[in-house]
Amino acid sequence: MRRGATTSSSAGTETTIDTAPRIEGDPAPETEDEPILRTRGDPAPATGGESGPETGGEPARASRGESGPASGGESRPETGGEPAPPALPPPVTALLGELWAAGCAAYVVGGSLRDALLGRPAHDWDLATDARPERLLELHPEAMYENRFGTVVVRREGVAYEITTFRSDHDYADHRRPERVEFGRRIEDDLARRDFTVNAMAWGGAPAATPIPTSPAFVDPFGGRTDAYAGILRAVGEPRARFEEDALRMVRAVRLAATLGFTVEPATLAAIAANAELARHLSGERIAAELEKLLAAPRPSVGFRLMADTGLLDVVFPEISAQRGIVQGKIPGDDLLDHTLRSVDAAPRDRPVVRLAALVHDVGKPVTLADGHFRGHEIVGATIAGDLLRRLRMPRATIDRVTLLVRQHMFSYQPEWSDGAVRRFINRIGRHALEELFELREADNVGSGFFGPSPDIVELRGRVAEQLEAKVALDLRDLAVNGDDLIAELGLTPGRTVGALLDDLLEQVIADPESNDRPTLLLLAQAMLEPDR
Ligand code: ATP
Ligand code: MG
């Protein structure tokens, strides 16, 4: 983010601002230390705020979000007249009030307004205003200016609020981002560029528009509220044209249908089927951002099924699409795609990595199928999954975790395993991946028609927990000696011998935890060296 980069402005005319630099296809920076899947923080509480626009009008009597219907398909709560204002968190109410007081039009827009209306937990509140970025920076000198999007980001109580100047988008190139963005003066123009009717509503006011400030109200030119209450996802304007402009909207449609539990309106769905090929132009990053949200839906399969039905899956995730029609005889009538989608739904919703791993855990099966078996599919699958996730520019830490899970998901436990075998298993998987691997296996089992935890896994989990609690050495960091000790005590030079010795010592300690003390290990190391001396 950059601070203070301003755009040229000329009073009364539309102004062209910098558009997003072409990031499609640019290599993403290595992001080893990035949080897994860039999951968001807790949603902002949808508490009611009290203050209305200081310039007049009715106070924004914000009721709690629960007043709206919990999901689509329910009837709208208000019976006539101006509907109840949405539940806004106090910082949002305050920001609106400050903009109104400065004589600017200001509205709450986008997904957070939609969610507040539906009584769902809202997050990432977005505001739209007629104030230009430079004016916003005058009003909020501490704000950050994100020039790529013409957005000013204000932080309140540790939460970021995006304030974006009304804009309209023009000249879409390659079915992706607009080439040219213009600042606008009317909220209606800003809403018209948005994707779906439920995302194209605003609530707020324009105090400067008349001598007498208007009360804050809904602006809903496309019937977003009716669609929201009916649970319908409908493109703003002509759906084919909107998807031709930006193919990501098709992926957003299936993602929003799954997260909101909405149905996609028939003409919008038909336009996705007609335009699915255009998704080929999308960058990995933009698909990944939608995939992350889709995987957090109550049942991601809803979105993947819509993708499969419209042909979007073939274009965006051909590796998953290739699972269609492959029979594996687990649940009668199910093919491999059905199994995968059941597994994804069964993986814990608050475990994005496990859900992602469930999505790709069997991608190696179509290519390894021979004589009704999928030998080695977990090894081939880890490679295919890695390629898929790299294409999406996922953070490296996520790719490593997911490919490890795919590679290891076929482990088979035998009750006769010794404690040493359990410790070797922990060492092979890595202690931080164990819980995710068990969760993946459980999801895989549910996807195969087994319900309830499998007794084997319950037993292995218990035995693993025992070993972890015993605080015995399970990896190199737990050894009572390190490389420096071996070099100092045994007169070795740094290099491969030291590494190999440490590995051998660990193997010894995993078999016999009692041997993990410094003198014993040094003696052992000495003995291991003897034949070479
Ligand atoms: P979520 O609640 O999951 O964040 P959202 O609808 O808020 O869903 P965002 O990606 O946060 O999704 O986008 C915020 C708003 O910006 C949307 O509600 C919509 O009005 C608009 N928008 C986002 N992406 C597009 C797009 N590709 N084309 C048109 N409008 C878009
Ligand atoms: Mg949002």
Image (spheres, helix red, strand yellow):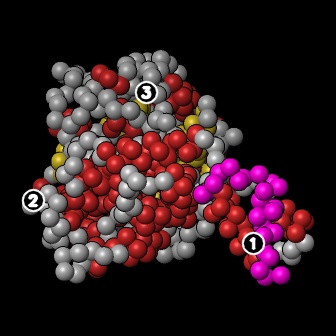
Element carrying mark 2: loop
For the record, the magenta segment spans: 510-533
Amino acid at the residue labelled 1: Met
Q: Nearer the viewer, residue 228 or 449?
A: 449
Residue that mark 3 sits on: 46
Q: Which residue appears at 61% of the width and 30% of the height? A: 157
As for residue 331 lying within the magenta part, the answer is no
Give the residue at the far left of this rendering: 333
Mark seen at residue 368? none
Q: Nearer the viewer, residue 118 or 171?
A: 118
Whole-angstrom CA distance, mark 2 to mark 3, is: 45 Å
Please tell me whether the stretch drawn in magenta is mainly helix, strand or loop: helix
Q: Nearer the viewer, residue 319 or 532?
A: 532
Q: Which residue appears at 36% of the width and 48% of the height? A: 457
Whole-angstrom CA distance, mark 2 to mark 1, is: 56 Å
Residue that mark 2 sits on: 332
In the rendered image, the quadrant that contains the N terminus is bottom right
Q: Which residue appears at 28% of the width and 68% of the height? A: 320
Residue 531 lies, with reference to residue 276, above or below; the image says below
Residue that mark 1 sits on: 528
